[in-house]
Image: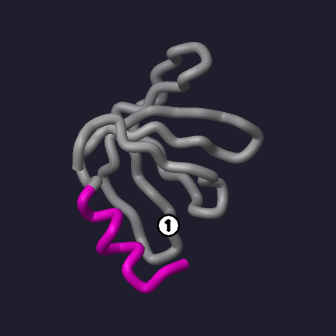
Amino acid sequence: MGKNLGTDLRKFMDKRLRLTLNKGRKIEGILRGFDVYMNIVVDETVAVMDGAPMGMVVIRGNAVEMMEALERA
């Protein structure tokens, strides 16, 4: 993990993201916070597969495989 990961993620604060998690799970939501371990807080979260609303969730950093911006940073 790079030293500037926090700096890089800051530009995505309050932006809509799609996250691919372990076991192929995908969610979309708005990035509200993160820490040095890349644990992240996502708000207005929706499961991509079935559109199920999940509200605000905290995701462990080691569960995140990919982050994709859905709007410009």
Estimate the x, y position of residue 32 in percent, counting from the top left. Answer: 30, 51
Left or right: 64 with respect to 56?
Answer: right
Taking the spot 65% from the left edge, 54% from the top edge, the residue there is 63
Magenta stretch contains residue 71: no
Estimate the x, y position of residue 6 in percent, counting from the top left. Answer: 36, 73
Q: Is residue 70 above or below residue 49?
A: below
Left or right: 17 with respect to 27?
Answer: left
Task: Identify the residue at the far top of this view.
Answer: 50
Helix, strand or loop at mark 1? loop
Taking the spot 38% from the left edge, 36% from the top edge, the residue there is 29
Left or right: 51 with respect to 72?
Answer: right
Quadrant of res 16? top left
Q: Which residue corresponds to mark 1? A: 38
- Quadrant where the N terminus sits is bottom right
Estimate the x, y position of residue 51 in percent, counting from the top left. Answer: 51, 15
Applied colour scheme: one colour
Task: Identify the residue at the far bottom of this view.
Answer: 3
Q: Which residues are magenta?
A: 1-11
Taking the spot 27% from the left edge, 64% from the top edge, the residue there is 10
Residue type at mark 1 is Met
